[in-house]
Amino acid sequence: MPSFNPKDHHPRYFYQLFMGALAPRPVGWVSTLNEDGSVNLAPMSCFNAINTRPPMVMISVGNQDGELKHTTENIFREKECVIHIPEYHQLDLVHQSAGHFPKNQSEVALLGLSTIPSETIKTPALKEGKVRFECTLHSVHELPTNHVIFLTITNLVIDESLMENGIISMEQFHPIARLSGGSYAPIGESVHLKKYSINPSEEGQD
């Protein structure tokens, strides 16, 4: 079975293998405030939950030609952002928003999207985002080529069309899964399993 030591391969080649193996990954669609007050929008696939009490997420943002990306700059300055969970029917818009645009050029405006006020922070949210986290900056861990940004969730918004019996319905909610290279996938059939416990009296409890 082939094995790959990162020291033996070009970083870009190893990146393709690494990200291809670490799949699927959730996609976060992050809105931040530009310096001029316009709204920046960018997708992040190095994104996930890291804590529950308090609820926290992380995004890892690489540099662009040795400079901070606009998302990183904006979060460092404003200390907040909104992370949306885009759905599969929005994939083309998500992909377009990953392009390189001039500073203070709003991807929201370019893509014909619209914003609405957030409830706990000043950064606007996408009106088209049915699931979103309003976040404030907790801390930053600087890596050689990335900044890992830890964020505290101050508000979770879920559109009622995605809810059933007080929880998210995976029959209605269709988030994007990030795969290798330029590949994405919809979430297919899901299976619900009861919680397993070594204590027979607790088995089956959710």
Image: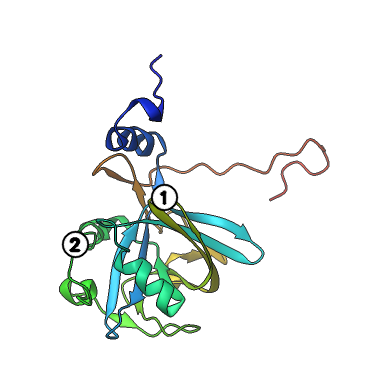
Horizontal placement of 152 versus 98: left or right? right
Q: Residue at x 39, y 69 (%)?
A: 130
User: Dot 2, crowdedness within 10 Å: few (<14), some or many (≥20)?
Assistant: few
The relative height of residue 141 versus residue 54 in the rendered view (above or below) is above
Task: For the residues labelled 1 and 2, say whether their Cβ atoms are less than 8 Å apart.
Answer: no
Task: Look at label 2 and name its amino acid.
Answer: His
Picture layout, residue 47 above or below residue 19: below
Question: Percent from the top left, x then y, of residue 119?
Answer: 48, 84
Q: What residue sits 22% from the left and 73% below the top?
A: 103
Residue 144's disc is 1
Q: Find residue 127 and report its horizontal and vertical position in percent.
A: 32, 77
Q: Residue at x 46, y 76 (%)?
A: 79
Residue 65, by quadrant, is bottom left
Label 1 SS: loop
Report the side of 17 relative to 111 (left or right).
Answer: right
- Looking at the rendered structure, the secondary structure element under dot 2 is loop
**Which residue corresponds to the image point at 36% horizontal and 71% vertical from the top-left?**
73
Of the numbered discs 1 and 2, the one sitting upstream in the chain is 2
Task: Depth check: give the residue in front, 29 or 60.
Answer: 60
Task: Determine which residue is flagged by label 2.
Answer: 100
Q: Is residue 67 visible?
A: yes
Quarter occupied by residue 28: bottom left
Q: Give x and y (percent) for residue 23.
A: 40, 39
- Apparent side of residue 19 relative to residue 158 in the rendered image (left or right): left
Residue 110: quadrant of the picture: bottom left
Residue 155 in the image: state x and y as whole percent.
53, 75
Indicate whether 118 appears above or below 168: below
